[in-house]
Image (cartoon, grey):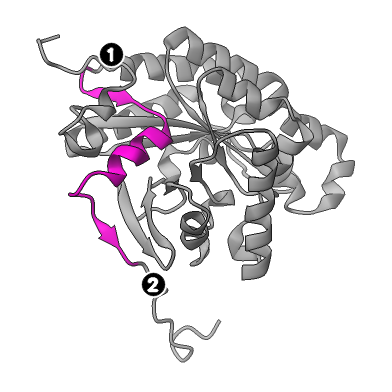
């Protein structure tokens, strides 16, 4: 390592005078969506009667999460955990335990029902219900991620209205950008399907949430290629993982190998989403966007 090179440790993204990236070529935000039973229950409350399916989902908080927290502690890597309010409420130990490990807890809806499936009033009620849970648990919330990344056109406005700094649901870039809303600007930390373990590992016969279980070796190859691309172009490597998927033994070992690779790259740094959003909000060079629904004329798009 040459003098003055970033060493890959947490905190380099905060380097003053270097914009949102600090001195890094790429910044990694390691994120975990601690969904537990909510993605299945969002398909229908009758699935609560499916003992096997519910055990599959409970594996995440009960087994996968402790394993992941130990892994992160071993490598001294910070992370952000997006937690549905329902999960935090039904497991009141969960969010405080994440915070006690030095990681960020963030808003991931209350019910894990996607905003695109709700009315504006229902989305607001769900959003605020989750915030109330975290408030009762004295968990400070800085950011939000929509269930299934299916944000509505009012979602970022709700984030700004309630004083949160960032959203992480949209896919308009591979670097942070600002979204202008009637309630003020929100930093967007963009996501993409290629950086989500759901597309690689998720499988349930009912409800159908995936049909292919990939080899962890293939998944790590994909993520290494994407990280190298972000290093080349100067991007945000915003990896989304789920404890009930990536917390399983072989996948957890593969995740460790990937993190060790990223940590070995001198031009990569790790940061919590809130830390990246803070530096991005102060970066005068950050792009500001005013997203609007496209004109979908009924004579062209009848349904």
Kindly report the distance in space between the C-alpha atoms of the residues bearing marks 2 and 1: 41 Å
| Residue found 76% across the figure and 48% down from its top | 41
Place residue 289 in its image quadrant: bottom left
Residue 59 screen position, x and y as percent: 72, 26
Residue 147 is labelled as: none
| Residue found 39% across the figure and 32% down from its top | 29
Compare marks 2 and 1 and give the one earlier in the sequence. Answer: 1
The span picked out in magenta is 266-290
**In which quadrant of the rendered image does the N terminus lie?**
top left
Determine crowd level at label 1: few under 14, some 14-19, many 20+ residues with C-alpha closer than 10 A.
few
Residue furthest out toward the right:
49
Q: Label 1 belongs to which residue?
A: 264
Residue 160 higher or lower than 205, as above or below = below
Residue 302 higher or lower than 229, as above or below = below
| Residue found 73% across the figure and 42% down from its top | 86
Q: Is residue 271 magenta?
A: yes
Closer to us: 12 or 47:
12
Q: Is residue 157 magenta?
A: no
Are the residues at dot 2 and dot 1 in contact (C-beta closer than 8 Å)? no
Mark 1 element type = helix
Mark 2 element type = loop
**In which quadrant of the rendered image does the C terminus lie?**
bottom right
| Residue found 47% across the figure and 62% down from its top | 157
Mark yes or no: residue 113 visible.
Answer: no
Closer to us: 276 or 211:
276
Residue 292 is labelled as: 2
Left or right, residue 166 beside residue 172: right
Residue 245 higher or lower than 10, as above or below = below
Residue 197 screen position, x and y as percent: 51, 35
Residue 56 screen position, x and y as percent: 74, 31
């Amino acid at each position: 390592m040459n003098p003055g090179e970033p060493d890959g440790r947490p905190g380099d993204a905060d380097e003053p005078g270097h914009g949102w990236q600090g001195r890094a070529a790429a910044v990694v935000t390691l994120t975990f969506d601690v969904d537990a039973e909510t993605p299945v229950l969002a398909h229908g409350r009758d699935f609560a009667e499916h003992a096997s399916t519910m055990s599959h989902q409970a594996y995440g908080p009960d087994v996968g999460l402790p394993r992941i927290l130990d892994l992160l502690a071993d490598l001294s890597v910070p992370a952000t955990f997006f937690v549905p309010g329902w999960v935090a409420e039904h497991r009141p130990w969960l969010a405080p335990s994440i915070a006690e490990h030095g990681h960020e807890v963030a808003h991931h809806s209350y019910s894990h029902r996607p905003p695109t499936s709700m009315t504006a009033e229902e989305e607001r009620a769900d959003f605020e219900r989750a915030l109330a849970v975290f408030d009762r648990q004295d968990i400070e919330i800085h950011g939000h991620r929509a269930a299934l990344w299916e944000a509505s056109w009012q979602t970022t406005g709700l984030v700004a209205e309630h004083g949160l700094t960032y959203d992480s649901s949209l896919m308009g870039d591979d670097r942070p950008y600002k979204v202008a809303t009637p309630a003020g600007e929100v930093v967007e930390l963009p996501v993409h399907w290629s950086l989500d373990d759901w597309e690689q590992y998720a499988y349930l016969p009912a409800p159908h949430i995936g049909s292919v279980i990939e080899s962890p070796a293939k998944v790590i190859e994909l993520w290494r290629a994407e990280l190298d691309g972000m290093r080349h172009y100067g991007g945000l490597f915003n990896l989304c993982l789920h404890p009930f998927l990536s917390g399983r033994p072989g996948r957890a070992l593969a995740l460790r190998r990937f993190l060790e690779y990223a940590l070995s790259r001198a031009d990569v740094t790790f940061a919590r989403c809130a830390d990246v959003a803070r530096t991005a909000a102060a970066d005068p060079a950050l792009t500001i966007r005013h997203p609007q629904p496209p004109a979908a004329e009924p004579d062209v798009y009848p349904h």
